[in-house]
Amino acid sequence: MKQFITKHDIWLRLLSLALAFVLWAIVMGEENPTRAAIFSGITVNVTGQDELLEEYGLSLIEMDMNTVTVHVSGPRNSITPSELQNRITAELDISGCTEAGEYDLKPLVSVQRAGVEVTNVTPRTIHVRVDKMTTMNVPVRVEAVGSPAEGFRAGRPEPVTANKVTVQGPVSELEETVYAYAVISADGKTATVTEECPITLYNGAGEPITGAHVTCLTERIKVRLPIYPIETIPLSVTLRGGGSVTEEETEVSIEPDSVKVIGDPNVIAGMKEIDLGELNLDSVRTGVPIEMEIPLPDGVRLDEGQPTTAKVTVTIDGIETRTVEVSKIALNDTAEQSPYTAAVAAQSLPVELRGSASALDEVDESGLTIGITFDSAALGEGAHMVRGVVVASNLPDGVSLVEQDVQVMLEITLNDQADGVLPDGGQHIEQPDAALPEEGGDAA
């Protein structure tokens, strides 16, 4: 037994236990011992904001922490967490931040309880940023997304309440704000809608501004989205009969024969067809397509992808158009004592005739003359596009000119340079003895 007690230090262990009990009794015998405690999540109240704004025009923009952790010590009966939490205050005075910039400030922490003192605060400093706040107006851009119901097309959305909104923020950041953006949905719509849409601010690169420092004073705007029915309207043309050709003798084809339009439903409801205009059967080129603009009434427009012109082809029974080359060209220079010589750049010019195939075969091209009246002194040296007039004699019955006017390139040179042959091989034509038509061509 003695060896066992000696081996395991029993007496030493019993003595340690006794001493610990005595010390505990001494401590517990004191009336109110000192103890420490830690309180987290203490809200930091910012002071000096009004003074900073009034005197320097600066505002608190950013604060990296708004709570602190406080270490305290004091009498045990004063350190009661449920009570003491509400008696600890933390303040951050920014009145000394008199210039725009960033600062590290020490929060002032106090405890409203006698005998309790603050031993530590974390973090020791709080990082703040102050800057001048200002406002400016930016334009509103609206966009429609989605697709209306089948047979309908969305028009251009427009803001109803305002074309601009006011944004607020620090001077250094506000200049990045370029426009306000709102989106309205067209999904499944069959009629014009007006909705309140939230606003998002964007910079010049088309990226949303996500920071909290710049804000829009208007959170939502009204946007109107017109929804139009898509209607298919046939195309037509008005024919004006001449002395030799009647409307009954003609056949008209239009490509395309109809177009899709959108717009004011009341206007479209009264549109039975779209008249491209009037064609004179006495001068129309048979079998030759004519491109004509598609006119539309106010409040109506072509749907996306629709052509703005149509090709009209008129075919007249037994009538065709034929082109002949006219080489007889008469020049009439009205200038007195002109120092210039005129010549036509081409050997012959095309003229279109219309009639039956058998009658066109009988045309004598020598009976066609192109007369050009001009003032060489007024035109001066060089190449000029002028008007010529076709004069026809002895045309067979039923044959007529498609157009009497033709465009002619006239070369004018000084007399000492003219030799009757143009550099490009054109023909110099002397004025004939025969009288020219009175309505000769003027300078184009």
Image: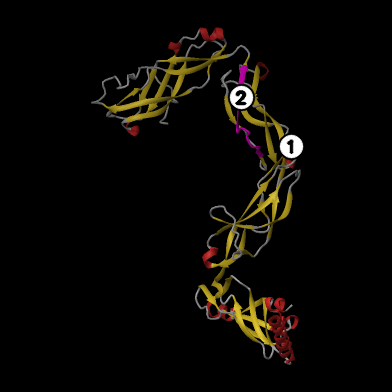
Tell me residue 421's x, y (percent).
29, 19
Q: Is residue 404 above or below residue 79?
A: above
Q: How is the image coloured?
A: secondary structure
In depth, the one of 226 and 180 nearer the eye is: 180
Of circles 1 and 2, the one toward us is 1
Query: What's the mark number on residue 151?
Result: 1
Q: Earlier in the sequence, mark 1 or mark 2?
A: 1
Residue lying at 59% horizontally and 13% vertically, measured from the top left: 319
Of helix, strand and loop, which one carries label 2? strand
Quadrant location of the C terminus in the rendered image: top left
Residue stretch rendered in magenta on the structure? 301-315
Q: Is residue 209 above or below residue 432?
A: below
Main SS category, magenta section: strand
Tell me residue 267's x, y (percent).
72, 40
Residue reaching furthest to the left: 416
Q: Pointer 1 and pointer 2: residues touching (CB < 8 Å)?
A: no
Residue lying at 53% horizontally and 55% vertically, measured from the top left: 204
Q: In which quarter of the view is residue 196 placed?
A: bottom right
**Residue of label 2:** 312
The kind of residue on which mark 1 rests is: Gly
Q: In which quarter of the view is residue 249 placed?
A: top right
Tell me residue 346's x, y (percent).
38, 20
Residue lying at 42% horizontally and 29% vertically, measured from the top left: 442
Q: Is residue 333 left or right of residue 368?
A: left
Quadrant location of the N terminus in the rendered image: bottom right
Tell me residue 296's x, y (percent).
65, 37
Q: Is residue 361 above or below residue 89?
A: above
In depth, the one of 338 and 269 nearer the eye is: 269
